[in-house]
Amino acid sequence: MAREQRKLDHVRLALTGEPVEISDFDDIQIVHRSFPETKLQDCRIDSSIGGLPFSSPIFINAMTGGADATKRINRALAEVARETGVGLAVGSQSAGLQDPDLEDTYRIVRQTNPNGIIIANLSAASPPEQVKRAVDMIEADLLQLHINVPQEMIMPEGDRDFTGILANVEKVTAELNVPVIVKEVGFGMCRETYRQLIDRGVSIVDVGGSGGTNFISIENRRRKRQEFDFLSGWGQSTAVSLLEATLCHELEFVASGGIRHSLDMIKCMILGARAVGVAGPILRLLEKEGVSGVVDAIQNWHEQIRTLMTILGTPSIDSLREVPVVVTGRTKDWCEVRQID
Ligand code: FNR
């Protein structure tokens, strides 16, 4: 019951979160060149993650499931995914593993979108047999293992022991027969983390940077006394997390956290991401404008991405990586201190 309430709290508090106004993406300036030598018709937005074809580089990132009222949201998100061809991750499936009555709240996404790309989600501390059950529950094409230490620590009922997680990630990655994405939930990553993951055989990472939905603030608002306000700026932004990845050629990158519009998406892909995940903004749009409003927004993003690719002279998602950028402001300061070129 407490768990179901937490799922509902997360949705309610994410819905009342403020949209992001300024972001480190504004420190990334794209260099305009005058002769793109491309045509709109030739610009293709398909991508791939872990060898699986994605018809769009956008996916709906992990949010919910695990409480009866969240089934409605997952059904709506799956309708959006079916209509637009984007991938969809479900929220953490631990509730469904512990209570078979709640499996439905996740299964609904596969029932609604039988042929789409569906991504399972569990904590990176979950043992391989649980992870396999979560993947089977929704016939998932990929799996996200989320890592969210600051959130757990601020969550009154959260975990307090984070030992052995890297070893578990290594085991799960080796044993699973679908691609595994290790995902932060809004605190970002750094090159030291990437190195640790590479050493454990991980090949796909969702940098999950700060700048968007903030789970320190959300958990802080669930506490009796909101004494963790001072931590609300914790972690690396999505832009910084991608810049930290510059030398990690062994990994495939997915970007999420604080992505506001198609220009942020393009910047993520210039900085090396193969796909971009959006969560909170989609939930808020769904609440306000329903399935058709979200479908329209995603279709607009697709067209805008193709427009930007034409302007940039980059007919494929991969070729975006060749586009030069200038980094300014505090993001530039970060790069200088961390010696990122
Ligand atoms: C989330 N997120 C999340 N992530 C995860 O791996 N497992 C989960 O169960 C959840 N649950 C969840 C609930 C709600 C209501 C929201 C809004 C988000 C985190 C999400 O996938 C993403 O990493 C962050 O929200 C940052 O992206 P945005 O919201 O800034 O686009």
Image: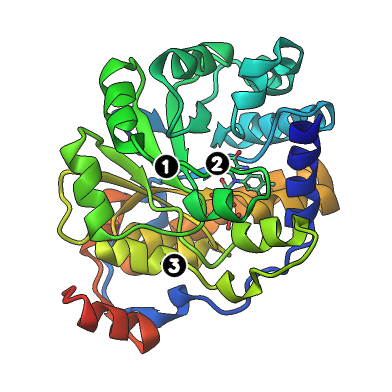
CB-based contact (under 8 Å), mark 2 and mark 3: no
Q: Is residue 83 left or right of residue 249?
A: right
Mark 2 belongs to which amino acid? Asp
Q: Residue at x 18, y 73 (%)?
A: 340
Q: Which residue is mark 3?
A: 237
Q: Nearer the viewer, residue 121 or 178?
A: 121
Mark 3 or 1 closer to N-term? 1
Mark 2 or 3 closer to N-term? 2
Q: Residue at x 25, y 67 (%)?
A: 323
Kindly tell me whether residue 98 is visible in this rendering.
yes
Q: Nearer the viewer, residue 302 or 222?
A: 222
Q: Residues within 10 Å of mark 3 (few under 14, many from 20)?
A: many
Q: Nearer the viewer, residue 192 or 303?
A: 192
Q: Quadrant of the C terminus?
A: bottom left
The quarter holding residue 313 reads bottom left
Compared to 195, does 83 lie above or below? Answer: above
Q: Residue at x 81, y 38 (%)?
A: 5
Compared to 174, does 264 lie above or below? Answer: below
Instruction: Determine whether the beta carbon of the residue marked 1 sits less than 8 angstroms from the nearest atom of ligand 1.
Output: no
What is the spatial separation of the Cα atoms under label 3 and label 1, in whole angstroms? 23 Å
Compared to 40, does 52 lie above or below? Answer: above
Mark 3 belongs to which amino acid? Ser
CB-based contact (under 8 Å), mark 2 and mark 1: yes
On the image, the x and y values in percent for residue 191 come to 23, 59
Q: Which residue is mark 2?
A: 159
Total count of labels: 3
